[in-house]
Amino acid sequence: MSTFKQRQSIANLLLGTNMDVDEDTHRVIFISNCSIEKLPDKVILHIFSYLSHLEICRMAMICRRWRTIAYNTQLWKNVSLRPEVSGLHVGSLESLLSLISVRFGPSLRYIELPIELITHTVLHELSSKCPNLTHMLLDFSTAMQLHDFSEMQAFPAKLRYMCICLSEVIFMEGFMRKIYNFINGLEVLHLIGTYEKCEEEEEEIYEVINVHKLKSATPNLRVINLYGINFIDDSHIDAFSSNCIQLECLAVNFCNKVTGSTLKALLARSKQLKCLLMNGTSLKSEYVMQAEWDKCSVQELDISGTDLSTECLIDVLTRIPTLRFLSAGQINGFNDSVLKAWMEGGNPKTLIALDLDSSDNISDEGLARFITRYGAQLQACVLSGMTHITDQLWMTIMPILTNIRIIVMGTTERLSGNIHVDQLMDTIGSHCTKLERLELRWDPENLRFSDKSQKAIDLLRVKCLKLRCLVLNDGRYYETVKANFERADRTTVVRTTTSCRVSAYHVLSNYNDLIFN
């Protein structure tokens, strides 16, 4: 169904009228009054497809006809049963078993289960009644004990994507031993740890899942994401690299026991590895420099929040032949000499994304020289968290960023001077017409704008038609921008930093596979 027809259907439902749309002139033609009951089932079904499952369940209470439409299996292909995520709560296992059989069936492609619903009976039912289930999330994060899986004999066998949210203290081996024979077709694996719950002083670290056995059962993995797991170290990376020859993307963000000692072996074995994300790890410069970066296939690299030296950074960046994505924020060793050496080597010629968040040792002159040379090819640029990078630099480089899709600027620290946000918005709207995501982190007290700021906001809204996310700190200017976009029926664009952050990760080649939770 075309965009015009979608809008027509929704408007018909809301207004209780029958109308048509002239696709050439975009004019709305009202034909005659009609009631909502006259809409065909397929139109109501299409409208319901835009609603969340919680809202669909509410619609099912309107009448018998809507109940029948709401329970159409086409609306239940991707289901989350975690109340804190979707708002859906299944009161008993019997109710879930009935839903799997009656409502989900062969249409189900993706399901999220909380710990209380992960039982061998439920998994058996999913295996037999949902033959097309390919994506699954199992949330054990709040578990204090597991159900008994000793009688489990079946498990969904067509899974391509699996995400397991680990518990802090519950050992998973009893459960994992039962599913090893069913998951050899996995292509994407997420193991999510308890990084956000960890305290500074850990009493004891438990290896709650046996990675060395898991890697033997999953030889076809393309994407591995080990996020915030306090027991993951270099030996686990070595284990995966020895068995997963098709590995394209490895993410070990916030696994602080990773030092890079097996990095050389990883790059030597994984010839197809293009994406390596190591944000917040404990990388050591000597190990990183030992790796043969000049012979690897890595194109996307995240080393933010590490303690790599200036010498190491120069060595790595001047040896990687085709780097398209670099995230190297919060590194004291990243300075002007690194940028200069990198430019002299000519290696940024393929770069499309640069994230240097909170890199205080880089001067605005150094950044200006780099972006003047390579800015036209950038699709993502993150230069936030630095007090010396103000609107003056952005006004200078913005005309160069003609292909930019993602911009993050500003700092939450109070500045001595003010940011002239009207001029900034005007410049962005004039030159960055491909922009999709924009975040301004400056304190509202530092944003200077006038009564005529609506004109600059209008220009941004009208010129940047692809803009889907504009993040600002809560304050007067946020309210002004939000009201402007809402008047133009773009109600989901403007958001606050308390609930949303913009990242350069959107341009990663495996971004869709890396999404979890």
Image (spheres, grey):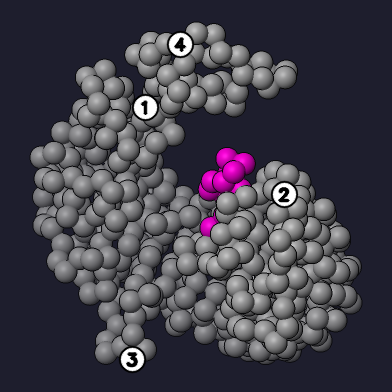
Horizontally, is 138 left or right of 360 in the view? left
Q: Residues within 10 Å of mark 2 (few under 14, many from 20)?
A: some
Tell me, yes or no, if residue 271 can be seen here: no
Q: Which circle marks residue 74 in the picture?
A: 1
Among the two numbered marks 4 and 3 on one chain, the one whose residue lies closer to the N terminus: 4
Against 120, is 399 above or below? below
Q: Secondary structure at mark 3?
A: loop
Quarter assignment of residue 392: bottom right
* Number of the front mark, 2 or 1: 2
Q: Which circle marks residue 33 in the picture?
A: 4
- Residue drawn at the location 19% of the way across and 62% of the way down: 174
| Residue 123 location (% of width, % of height) | 21, 44
- 3D distance between C-alphas at marks 1 and 3: 49 Å
Mark 4 touches mark 3? (CB < 8 Å): no
Task: Please name the amino acid that badge 3 sits on.
Answer: Glu
* Number of the front mark, 4 or 1: 4
- Residue drawn at the location 73% of the way across and 18% of the way down: 24
Residue that label 3 marks? 201
Q: Secondary structure at mark 1?
A: helix
Residue that label 2 marks? 458
Against 432, is 6 above or below? above
Task: Please name the amino acid that badge 1 sits on.
Answer: Gln
User: Is residue 250 one of those drawn in magenta?
Assistant: no
- Residue drawn at the location 60% of the way across and 88% of the way down: 307
